[in-house]
Image (tube, helix red, strand yellow):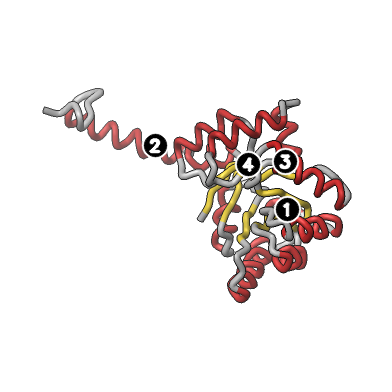
Amino acid sequence: MEFLLDTVHLSDIEKYDSVINLSGVTSNPSIIKKEGKIDFFNHLQKIRKILGKHRPLHVQVVGQTTEAMIADAHSVLEKIDPNVYIKIPTNQAGLTAMKILKKEDVKITATAIYSEFQGRLAMEIGADYLAPYYNRMVNLGLNAQKILNNLANQIARDNSQTKILAASFHTVEQVNEAFQAGCQAATLGADIFQTALNNPAIKGAIKDFTEDWESIYGTNTTITSLK
């Protein structure tokens, strides 16, 4: 099970890297826009420095044609890191680019997946990750959990090395559903982590424990302060 952070905000990456076993970071042009007009390559190199060499950084191409996608991929690999996972939309031009780049041993994340068929095509090409958009599928009236489960079953039947990296979540429950469906990984915005870890019920339980302890041993005491 892998938890990735879907942001390029450095302080959020540093924060959650200290809180959880962060598996990596994902990005796309919309996430870049939230950060403003950053020094793109320099900024992503900073993220790579936080992650180290062994945790994946996923960076999306912007080109619309196969040729432009391949050129973007080569620029990212040259200027950031040859081990970056290149995110490529799973359309006709993207699948062609994936096929060519896999022959170069480039790590590929097939993104913008809304259907089993897209996932199967990317899996057959040898994509390392499939990135289905969970909440966006839900908003389109699609059964996201069933689609992910069917892809997970296909991966198991084929003994494929492809992993499902579910993305686009609106709620913590959607994340749980994705893992229940068989996903190996999920990429979450910082807001999802914050919602999950700042549940009022958690705060209430901690407050009750503190009050019970202090009613016995005194205000502001801890186990360490006992003699």
- Front residue of this view, candidates 34 and 101: 101
Quarter-wise, where is residue 97 in the image? bottom right
Q: Nearer the viewer, residue 142 or 163?
A: 163
Disc sitting over residue 111 in the figure: 1
Q: Report helix, strand or loop for mark 2.
A: helix
Indicate whether 20 appears above or below 174: above
Coordinates of residue 168 in the picture (x, y in percent) = 67, 48
How far is disc 3 from disc 4 in space, using C-alphas?
18 Å
How packed is label 2: few (under 14 Cα within 10 Å), some, or many (20 or more)? few
The residue wearing badge 3 is 76
Residue 4 x, y percent position in the rendering: 57, 46
- Where is mark 2, residue-wise? 204
Mark 3–mark 1 Cα distance, whole angstroms, equals 17 Å
Q: Residues within 10 Å of mark 3 (few under 14, many from 20)?
A: many
Marks 2 and 3: in contact by CB < 8 Å? no
**Could you tell me residue 209's position as x and y percent?**
29, 37
Considering depth in this image, is 74 or 126 the residue closer to the camera? 74
Residue under circle 4?
A: 6
Q: Amino acid at mark 3?
A: Val
Asked if the residue at tag 1 contacts the one at tag 3, i.e. Cβ–Cβ closer than 8 Å, the answer is no
The location of residue 188, given as percent across then percent down, is 60, 44
What is the three-letter code of the residue carrying label 4?
Asp
Of labels 3 and 1, earlier in sequence is 3
Quick one: label 3 or label 2, which is nearer the N terminus?
3
Horizontal arrangement in the rendering, residue 119 relative to residue 68 (left or right): left
Asked if labels 2 and 1 touch by Cβ distance under 8 angstroms, the answer is: no
| Amino acid type shown at disc 2 | Gly
Q: Is residue 114 above or below residue 151?
A: above
Using the image, determine if residue 91 lies above or below residue 83. Answer: below
